[in-house]
Image: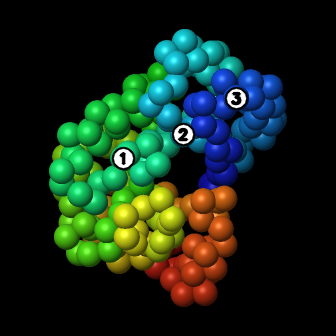
């Protein structure tokens, strides 16, 4: 059964607490088709996690790990230790909500070596809840091009690291580019 995520950021509680209540009520009313996808921002105050736990009680929650805008990028070996520390915040959130999935971006660098480094880091993270999420080819806040953009790249990482896969359709950070590319060229490669 397909389910759709209602994406929230852990900072939304500070920025717009009423929105958290509305989102939780909406997902609760549609819980057979929906879940909360909570993007973990490492600077989220500790007391906010207790509030989230109460507001999302009884709902399915998926955790989205911090990504390149929060200094997490698995394409580069020199970032591994920092990435592992940043990922710990996502793991703690996943534990809090008994989340079965932690969504993680591949990263920057369009060379084969960057893709291989991502696969290596995903394997070293060693968390069976981790899934790789497909990405657009380019993003303005990433060094060079992205990887994890084709079915072949996704398959390489999932096979090497033993992780799962999460298909995303356009968001404000990946407008239409990704879904049009998938639908025109490689939809079957991602979905099969």
Q: Which residue is mark 2?
A: 39
Question: What is the number of callouts on the image?
Answer: 3
Out of 170 and 187, give the one closest to the viewer.
170
Residue under label 1, please give it.
72
54 sits to left or right of 160: right
Q: CA distance from mark 2 to mark 1?
A: 13 Å
Identity of the residue drawn at 50% across and 34% down: 41
Query: Marks 3 and 2, Cα distance to the nearest angstrom?
Result: 14 Å
SS at badge 1: loop
Q: Is residue 115 above or below residue 133?
A: below
Write down the quadrant of residue 57 in the picture. top right
Secondary structure of the residue carrying numbered label 3: helix
| Position of residue 98 measured from the top left corner of the image (x, y, whole percent) | 47, 27
Residue 57: tell me if it is visible.
Answer: no
- Kindly report which numbered mark, 3 or 2, lies closer to the viewer in this rendering: 3
- Secondary structure under badge 2? strand
Looking at the image, tell me whether mark 1 or mark 3 is earlier in sequence order.
Answer: 3
**Residue that badge 3 annotates:** 15
Q: Is residue 130 above or below residue 15?
A: below
Please determine whether, in this image, residue 186 is positioned above or below residue 109. Answer: below
Residue 121 rendering spot, x and y as whole percentages: 22, 51
Tell me if label 1 and label 3 are in contact, CB under 8 Å.
Answer: no
- Give the CA distance from mark 1 to mark 3: 23 Å
Task: Tell me the residue at 66%/59% (across/down).
Answer: 172
Determine the residue positioned at 46% across, 79% down: 189
Task: Name the side, left or right, on which 54 lies relative to 159.
Answer: right
Label 2 crowding class (10 Å Cα cut-off): few <14, some 14-19, many 20+?
Answer: many
Percent from the top left, x then y, of residue 63?
50, 38
Q: Is residue 100 left or right of residue 53?
A: left
* Mark 3, other Cα within 10 Å: few <14 / some 14–19 / many ≥20: few
């Amino acid at each position: 059964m397909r389910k759709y995520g209602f994406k929230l950021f852990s900072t939304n509680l500070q920025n717009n607490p009423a929105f958290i209540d509305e989102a939780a009520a909406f997902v609760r009313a549609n819980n057979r088709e929906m879940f909360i996808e909570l993007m973990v921002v490492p600077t989220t105050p500790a007391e906010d996690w207790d509030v989230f736990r109460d507001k999302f009680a009884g709902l399915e929650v998926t955790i989205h790990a911090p990504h390149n805008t929060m200094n997490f990028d698995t394409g580069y070996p020199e970032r591994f230790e920092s990435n592992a520390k940043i990922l710990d915040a996502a793991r703690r959130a996943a534990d809090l909500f008994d989340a079965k999935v932690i969504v993680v971006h591949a990263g920057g660098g369009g060379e084969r070596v960057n893709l291989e480094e991502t696969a290596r880091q995903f394997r070293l993270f060693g968390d069976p809840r981790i899934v790789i999420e497909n990405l657009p080819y380019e993003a303005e806040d990433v060094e060079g091009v992205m990887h994890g953009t084709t079915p072949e790249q996704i398959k390489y990482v999932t096979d090497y690291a033993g992780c799962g896969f999460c298909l995303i359709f356009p968001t404000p950070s990946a407008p239409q580019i990704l879904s049009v590319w998938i639908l025109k060229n490689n939809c079957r490669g991602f979905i099969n």
